Structure formats: structure tokens, C-alpha cells
Amino acid sequence: MSSTRNTLQDQRVVIIGGTSGIGFAVARAAHDDGAAVVVISSRDRKVADAMAALGTRAEGHAADLTDEAALPALFERIGPFDHLVYSAGDALQIGPLSDIIDRDTIRKAFDVRVFGAMTAVKHAVPYLRTGGSVVLTSGVASLRPQKGWSLAASFCAAMEGFTRALAVELAPLRVNLVSPGLVRTPLWDGMPEADRAALYASAGAALPVGRVGEADDIAGAYLYLMTNRYSTGQTIVVDGGGVLV
């Protein structure tokens, strides 16, 4: 008996945060798998650059994900689609809780990663076709937090709980989560270059796979969750074995 792998051929995938890092890698992989992709970012220039790089079957929109009032019109412009991927994020806040300036700093960390995901899903659901899915993004800080990672661990854990609850609420629409480990993406660009290189080298050497992740390493997990029609409420960890050591 033979079987054919499910693909994204002739499906439409919306990737929020799809113009750089993991999100762009997902957009490129979905495009290569036959999907029409829609990338969304807060910056017009990044949207234009991503569309130029993706080529055919790609469109893009700029949107402020912290402005919920703008989301209904955004999804109305996009129209019906099959899969929503949410990978938006900003520079990571790393350091002791005592060094975080105030509650606004904490709230800002949640605005895009958690609250933005919640409101995006809320307004996207009416446009998701039967058999579609939502794939969200977290991180392994919730499973193996390091010193100074209390804020990151908090929003990662929030996304895990949100995913499980949403999978029940939106069934039979499928909802899953990807939890990456340390990945070489622009999220780390706020660090001085030498410090960033040292982080990648030391962290990679400590991992069972011997290196830090690349965005393309993570993209495959999103495609798996979009195309596997029997997976929902699940978190897939892609971390080079980081939670083991």
C-alpha cells in the first residue's frame, strides 16, 4: 500500500511575521511546497523585500499587530485562506527581573508575542477554510529557563496554554505550536556582534547537534503541522537537543 505525503499545493498560507527570520523561512518553504503565501509585517519595506525574494504566488501587507482595530480590515483584504502562521516577535528582553524598568516594559514584551497572537487568531478564524490550521510560536525558555529568562519563559508558557485551550475551542480547526531553541535570526541583532558570535559558538558547542539552529531548520516543523491533519493541541520542540543538556 502506498501513500502520498500531504502538501500545501494550491493552498493559501498567511504568515504574520513572515518577512524575516523563522517567519520568512516558513514563507519560503510553504511557497516551495506549492502554496500561495501572504506575508505580514509592521514595515512596508520589509514586506516589499520579502515579496521580491519570494516571487510568484506571494503577496504582502503591512500591519500594526498591537492595533486590534486594524485587524478586521486586514483579514477582509486578505480574504479566505487555509493556514495561519504566527511567528511575529521583537528583540528579546534578557536579564534579571530586577533590571526590567517597569510594567510597561513587561507589557510590551507580551504585546506582539502573546496579545498580538490572540487578537490575530480572533480576527482570522472567520476566514480560515474547512480543514485549515493555526500554527503559533513559543520557545524552549518555558521548558528549560536560564538565569535572566523569567520574562521570556513567561510568554512562552502563555503561548503553550493558549494553544491547548484554543485547539479545544476551535475544533475541528487544528491549532498547534512550534517551540524553537536558540536560532540564528535577527531577533538577536540587538546584541553586539562579538557577543552574539560568542553566544552562538558557546551555546552550539553545548548542544547534542553541535550547533545553533538556522531558520530553515525550524521551518519544516511548521510545514509538518500544517500538512498533518491528525495533529492538534501539540507543541513541537525543535532545539537541537537543548532541553536534554
Image: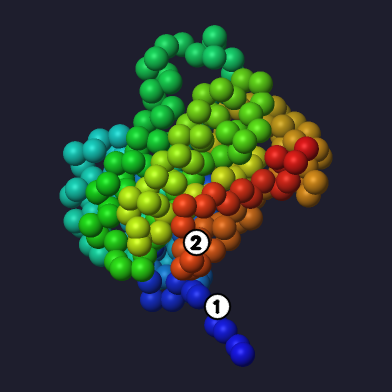
What is the quadrant of the C terminus in the image?
A: top right
Is label 2 in a helix, a strand or a loop?
loop
Residue 166, above or below 230: above
The spot of residue 138 in percent (x, y) is 51, 41
Crowd class of label 1 (few under 14; some 14 to 19; many from 20; radius 10 Å): few
Q: Is residue 160 left or right of residue 173?
A: right
Q: Is residue 71 left or right of residue 138?
A: left
Crowd class of label 2 (few under 14; some 14 to 19; many from 20; radius 10 Å): some
Residue 179 seen anywhere in this rendered image of the structure: yes
Q: Earlier in the sequence, mark 2 or mark 1?
A: 1
Question: What's the amino acid at mark 2?
Answer: Ser
In this rendered view, identify the residue nearer to me: 34 or 154.
Answer: 154
Q: Is residue 34 left or right of residue 149?
A: left
Could you tell me which residue is drawn at 19 percent across and 48 percent down?
72
Residue 93, above or below 76: above
Could you tell me which residue is drawn at 38 percent across and 51 percent down?
168
Res. 85 image quadrant: bottom left
Q: Which residue is mark 2?
A: 231
What is the quadrant of the N terminus in the image?
A: bottom right
The spot of residue 46 in percent (x, y) is 41, 47
Residue 18 seen anywhere in this rendered image of the structure: no
Which circle, 2 or 1, is nearer the viewer? 2
Q: Which residue is mark 1?
A: 5
